[in-house]
Amino acid sequence: MKTRIKTYALAILALAGLVSCEKVSPIGVLVSGTAVEDRVEMSHSYYSTYKGDFREHLAPSGEYSFLVGADSHLTSDLGRMQEMLQNGLDHDDLMYCHLGDIADTKAEYYINLGTLIDEYKWRYARKYYKEIYVGEEDGEWEREDRSNYIYVDTVYNSIYTVDDIPFPFYPVVGNHDITHNGWALWSNLFHSSFYDVYVTVGEEQNIVDHFIFLDTASGTLGKKQVELIEEGALFGKELEEFGLKMRHTFVFTHTNLFRPSSMQFASTFAREETFFLLKQFEKWNVHTVFYGHVHKWDERDYAGVKHITLDSMSERNSPGPGDYLLRVHVKADGTVSYEKVRMNYVAQ
């Protein structure tokens, strides 16, 4: 915890020394000088170096589920995020995906969010791994110190400490996440806004589902991200070379392509980028694309691809209980179904 606070303190000092020309985006939101080109460059560099941190997942039975939420806009009240993580843990979801605008850009909010994620890393490890005490036998206080335990993952034959437990929480960055130079805070906690994750399904482990996370926080892919996509950075061809068969592809991003109604924001993508993405979804054999951003549920099919936009899970935007999360069920035969998940937390 002390290390995390120190890291954020340094981030605050770094932000204080920055002078940026903020501009108004097409949707009327102040965005920082951290351009999509810089974010994608940093993200791809990190991901290429530390790809193992994002982890591949196994579903030996061929069946699994994952939980999706959007636009939590966290401040000092973490109730809705805690509810999402606990719900995913209780229902044995394989991963938890977030569609951007996770928190307002203040360091204290990210410190609190980081602490909450650390808590759920520990809960996740205690549920799925073997916990072994390695501290001194004498002294009750040592047994209360989580750093005196290791966690053994018998599936991957790996050993973790409380600081390096792999936790299957996968967010994308949103436009509010980059306001006021918020990228420094977001990337300090989540590192990469452009990456992919795989789920190997079945006992023979020769079938793979592909999860792709794109950076559209600026309302555009940008040149670098388009180049990387065209070069096949997220295509998964290396898996096919090992004899693995790609089954479903799911895409997660913040900015919506389709407008839920005339009352919501239209897409900010240039026409050429819209066509590029739709064509890319076809090349990737995408099953479903998940969006956030407009705080309004929308579901539609276009060119054989399902497009789902989620409501905001923020208690400020959605103060009462409601169906703000989505659970996706993937069956052994490849069937995919969706279930809206109710959130009951109400801010005090």
Image: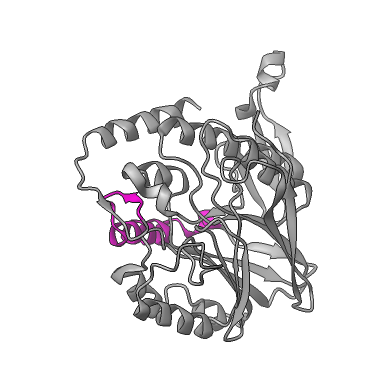
The image quadrant where one finds the C terminus is top right
State which region is magenta.
Answer: 28-54
Residue 176 vs 294, above or below: the answer is above
Residue 344 spot, x, y in % from top left = 74, 42
Q: Residue at x 19, y 41 (%)?
A: 19
Q: Would residue 31 be counted in the magenta stretch?
A: yes
Classify residue 230 by image quadrant. bottom left
214, above or below 73, in the image: below
Tag count in the figure? 0
In percent of width and height, residue 198 lies at 59, 67
For residue 171, side relative to residue 345 (left or right): left
Q: Residue at x 55, y 42 (%)?
A: 164
What coloring was used for the rendering? one colour
Q: Position of residue 11 (x, y in %)?
A: 33, 35
Q: Could one spot residue 128 in this view of the protein?
A: no
Image check: 39 left or right of 82? left
**Residue 257 among magenta residues:** no
